[in-house]
Structures are given as C-alpha cells and as structure tokens.
Amino acid sequence: MLLKDKVVIVSGTGPGLGIKLAVEAARAGARGVVCAARTAEKLDAAEAAIRALGAVAGDCAVLKLPTDINDATQCQRLVTETVAKLGRIDALFNSAYEHGSFEPVAQATLDGWAKLFNTNVVGTMRLTQAVVAQMKQQDGDGGAIVMINTMATRKPYPGEGAYAASKAAQEVATKYLAQEVGRHGIRVNSVFMGWMWGAPVRRGIRMMAKQQGRSEDDVLAGIVANIPLGRMPSDDECARAALMLASNYAAAITGACLDANGGEFMR
C-alpha cells in the first residue's frame, strides 16, 4: 500500500481535492490522517468520508484540528498535537489555498493580490516551516512535503492572474526548500492540477452554463476537447498522483513538478 503505516497531514481538507487527499491517504494504508481546515464542518465531513471506507481504512486514526495557515500559533499547534497523538509526521500535503476573485490583471485590486500571496505563499510556508522543524528531528528519516499547485501557472486562464502568480511564487519557494532540506531526508515536490471532476468543478460548470446560456454538457465537452485523454480526470485520480510523491516509490524524487491534468498541458 502506498502510504502503509505513515502519518500524514492534509491542510485545506475541504470539498474537492482536500477531502479526497485525506480519504485516499486512508485508503492507501496511512496509520494516521490529520485533517486541517478552518471550519469544523469541513473537518467533520472529512472524518465521515474516511469512516465510510469501513474496513478499507483499517485502523487509520483520524485527527481533526481547526487550522488557519495564516496563524503561526495554529500551525505550530497542528504539528505539536499530531506528534503528541501519532508520534511523528511522515507527509504534509499543502492543499489549503485562497483563490480570490476573477479579474483582469490590468484592473486587478492589488490588495486582493496581497491577500492571496499571504495565504498561498506565506501561509503555506508558515505551516511547512513548522513541519520541517519536526521532520528534521526524525532520525534522518525525514519525510515528504507535497505542494498542491495549479495548471493556471502554465496555461493562462481569464481572470486567474492573481491566483496563478501566487502559486508560481510557491513553486519557486518549493524548489529552494527542496535544495535546502534534502540532506535531512526531506523531499519536497509539487503537483500541478488541471481540471478535476468533482464537486467544485461541477458547481463551476453549472455557473458557466447559466452565464453563457449553454447546456452543462456543452460546457463540459468544450473543456474535455482540450484534454488528450478525452475525459476530465477525477479529483480522486489527481489525489492519488499526489500520494505517490509522498510514498516510498518516489524516494529518489525531490524538487520536481508533476503535471496531473490529463495531458492538457505538456512541457
């Protein structure tokens, strides 16, 4: 099993990819899954989804900790309580993010840009620093950190300039971090997600269809036409791609960027 006996933290355990990362980690044999999100409702939903796996999840422990990555005290508490209750941290999936509004760069509200950078770069690194400090103490066994990034940094989409710019900055910081912490046995990689079929995208397609006066099937077909696989990858599939980077199968990989988008963007 990909994550057999590992203890993993998933930040941003909300609808869509976040909850799928938590569920798939449990399915992949994790000994403990720590769910971190700002609201109790999202944490409860993640725990329920893991429990719904039944015997498939085995004896996987589920720890729910309300966490805002913009708060250093909460980030440290997340690490401290994880170690106190589960003994160590083997992997961190940085899935928490803020998207902001859709607006052209030339007319963008730059205060909004600052808010996105504060969460997507500074907040992400705030939690990462707290986890790295713990991983350095784990007898050279280190751990793995996986940053959830976006194809919007590769392929511009209307109105996503601020979000993409903040995630591009995260990508650069990730490479520097990978270079710095490798000697401690800590691997740091990024996964760049494209369209993912799941609850958030379904809502988005309904909205686009209404705004454009088209059917939902027509909107979806237009998106899928640009994906070489001929279908939109599911958020489950994309979550499993991220899990691979935290597994022992990726022991030789650090500082890498994995595209999980069905081939819509190819380097």
Image (cartoon, helix red, strand yellow):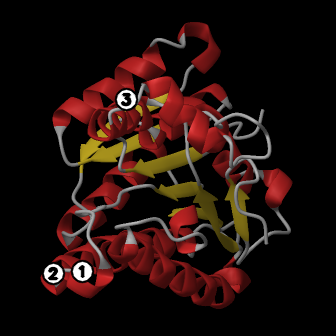
Precedes in sequence: disc 3 or disc 1 = 3
Q: How far apart are labels 3 and 1 at the CA level?
A: 30 Å
Residue at image position (47%, 22%) is: 50
Q: Quadrant of residue 107?
A: bottom left
Q: Note whether residue 58 is visible.
A: no
For image coordinates 21% across by 62% down, the residue present is 74
- The quadrant of the image that shows the C terminus is bottom right
Q: Secondary structure at mark 2?
A: loop
Residue 46 circle label: 3
Q: Determine the CA span between mark 2 and mark 1.
A: 7 Å
Kind of residue at disc 1: Trp
Q: Say above or below: 124 vs 10.
A: below
Q: Residues within 10 Å of mark 2 (few under 14, many from 20)?
A: few
Name the amino acid, label 2.
Thr
Q: Residue furthest front?
A: 213
Q: Residue beneath label 2, please? A: 109
Q: Nearer the viewer, residue 208 or 54?
A: 208
Q: Earlier in the sequence, mark 3 or mark 2?
A: 3
The reply to whether discs 2 and 1 touch (Cβ–Cβ < 8 Å) is: yes
Element type at mark 1: helix
Q: CA distance from mark 3 to mark 2?
A: 34 Å
* Residue type marked 3: Ala
Viewer-side residue, 197 vs 169? 197
Q: Nearer the viewer, mark 2 or mark 1?
A: 2
Tell me: residue 42, above or below residue 8: above
10 Å crowding of disc 1: few (<14), some (14-19), many (20+): some
Describe residue 244's horizontal placement relative to residue 149 as left or right.
Answer: right
Q: Which residue is mark 1?
A: 113
